[in-house]
Amino acid sequence: MIVKPFRAIRYSKNLKDLVAPPYDAINSDLKSQLKSKNPYNVVRLILPEGENRYENASTLFHEWLEKGILIHDEKRSIYPYQSFYKINGTVRSMRGILALFKLSEFKKGVIMPHEKTFSAPKADRLNLMKACGANFSPVLGLYKSSSTAKVDFDYIAKNSVLLDEFESDDKTEHRFYGLQNSVIIERIIDILRNYPIIIGDGHHRYETALNYKMLMEEQGAISDGHNWILMFLVDMADENISLLSINRKIKGVNLEELIPSMKRFFDIYPPENFADDPEAILISGKKGSYSATAKPEAMQLLDNMGISEVEKKVPTVVADKIIAEFLLKDKDTKIRYYGDDKKVMLEDNSVLIKLHPVKYEVIEDMVNNNYTMPQKSTFFYPKIPTGLVINKLDQDV
């Protein structure tokens, strides 16, 4: 991977009421809450409104720069970031670095996807990128270091300037730094040089950046900013980010009619079995829940579909292929996706499929064998806030 420091655009004020989750994790209620916190909250840029919403975002972006709400750092920096968050009653720490990474086609094996994408979000993000000429939200990049070539985050933080420290509404503590020491930066770049990256969150943003790069090359862009993308890089060897699942709510079928058809491919147990069986699926309706474990017949069906042994280890492959695509293929159903930190209301004619999180080793195995998981297979927690830094794409790196 090729990493570089950059001159970030960032807020001149305390970040507490100005940052937001990634755009695709914001519903209408949360958007209203973020807007009410501060008139300069970054949500107004990443989810603009109005008939000409992309142009409106561009207008706001440049107004905030002119007013000094947003400032442009004078020196190129790498920006370490750390958060302390609670999950399952335990406090954990996520840490990594924000920097620019050279865009690379997936086939080159430098930066690789693990999930499929949808076309509509990529069109939306490309329109915003064209209007504003900026990366507002970083892509989450993952790598696994060796003990002999490791970035020492604590050392980096000690040699950085603490730019901001704040606590968000969910009691997560955030520490945001700036590193300008050229010797340390070169050491980081050298350590990371031979590590490939797996995209965790932000597949749509990364593919959009590739499309934007191609567009700028066709237009004969002078600067090289379009060749780079803003990324937050996390070392998975430190196990400092939590990997959760994404649940499926299927509307158009109820639990009472789904369970009998599932018995052909699944052993059905009481819901308590789910917690103890890492391969189980939890199926819930308005009137109850069941735990389901795939039978050999399910694996045979996947074989018939051309599903590999590697893919069978992915919980969403089993759920999507057998339940959504095979058992419900003749039904008029709609699927919505929810991170497993969300409470989901069920109607009479709907079911919720809860899955165990996929293991990171399975993600690596999928990527190394050139497979991609179904959309919405992983949920990395916590999310890196949008608004810590912004990358302007019309400047040389």
Image: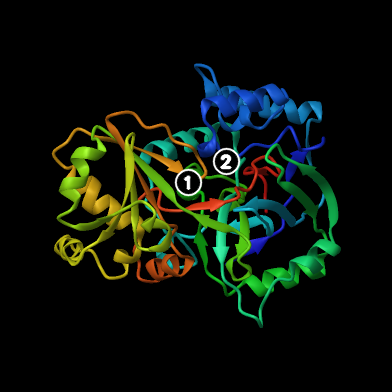
Q: Is residue 267 above or below residue 250?
A: below
What is the x, y in percent for residue 100?
64, 55
Query: In whole angstroms, how far apart are the C-alphas of marks 2 and 1?
Result: 17 Å
Residue type of the residue flagged with mark 1: Asp
**Disc ID at residue 22:** 2
Residue type of the residue flagged with mark 2: Pro
Q: Is residue 118 above or below residue 116?
A: above
Q: Nearer the viewer, residue 312 or 164?
A: 312
In the rendered image, the quadrant that contains the C terminus is bottom right
Tag 2 secondary structure: loop
What is the x, y in percent for residue 24?
50, 38
**Dividing the picture into quarters, in which one does residue 305 lie?**
bottom left
Q: Nearer the viewer, residue 258 or 166?
A: 258
**Residue mark closest to the camera, 2 vs 1:** 1
Q: Is residue 147 left or right of residue 372?
A: right
**Dividing the picture into quarters, in which one does residue 254 lie?**
top left
Residue appearing at x 29%, y 65% in the figure: 312
What is the x, y in percent for residue 377?
40, 52
**Dividing the picture into quarters, in which one does residue 13 lie?**
top right
